[in-house]
Amino acid sequence: MTHNPNIIWHPAAISKSDRQSLNGHKSCVLWFTGLSGSGKSVLANAVDEKLYRKGIQSYVLDGDNIRHGLNKDLGFQTGDRIENIRRIGEVAKLFVDSGQMILTAFISPFREDRDMVRALFPKGEFFEIYVKCPLHVCEQRDPKGLYKKARNGEIKHFTGIDSPYEAPLSPDFIIESDQTSISDGADLIINALQNRGII
């Protein structure tokens, strides 16, 4: 998509650092990625709840929820998946600019797309969290019955079945959800954010 020279970015009167100072914490993206059923949404919401209890301004963008509104025009072919992540990256950037912690829970199966989003942010504002879980465990969980439908040919382009998932090569955090409880995983992330001076 080419840039229209007639559209000019309008600078805000209140800066990101001003908003961070008001909130009492830095802003950043926690980008949860992993297979369907790996526990991304549950973990992101557990972290969000812990942040809320600490008085941190935060919000979760969930893959399914976004497809009910902003991205309801997109399917699951490769091009639509790329556009899905591009839009979320831009929305996340706005949240970070507003001084908030934004947690995104999307399969986001392609490394190139995740790297594209990371490139939108300065160093220290984007953290990739790989919610690692073996495919067979995700299939056993199958909370939405999607793997069964994919195996039966009722769903096409399903990640892990007939569409690839490219695991992160150097994620900022790895939570092995088949070995770590949601509460413990959330605590690990909160502690890491505190150690890095984010919160």
Image (cartoon, grey):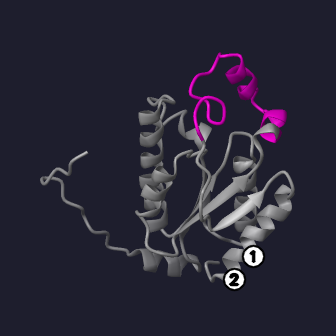
**Where is 65 relative to 151, above or below?**
below
Residue at x-position 44% and y-position 42%:
82
Give, as a three-letter code, the residue at label 1. Asn
Residue furthest to the left in view is: 6
Q: Which residue is mark 1?
A: 191
Give the answer, above or below, for where 85 lies relative to 175: above
Q: Nearer the viewer, residue 54 or 3?
A: 3
Q: Main secondary structure of the magenta part?
A: loop
Q: Position of residue 117 (x, y in %)?
A: 45, 57
**167 drawn magenta:** no
Q: Which residues are magenta?
A: 137-164
Which quarter of the rendering shows the C terminus? bottom right
Asked if residue 142 is among those painted magenta in the image, a careful observer would answer yes
Q: Residue 10: x percent and y percent? A: 24, 64
Along the viewing direction, whichever of 178 and 188 lies nearer the viewer = 178
118 sits left or right of 193 in the view:
left
The three-letter code of the residue at mark 2 reads Asn
- Callout 1: 10 Å neighbours few (<14), some, many (20+)? few
Q: CA distance from mark 1 to mark 2?
A: 6 Å
* CB atoms of marks 1 and 2 within 8 Å: yes
Q: Residue at x 75, y 30 (%)?
A: 144
Location of mark 2 (residue): 195
Q: Secondary structure at mark 2?
A: helix
Quarter containing the N terminus? top left
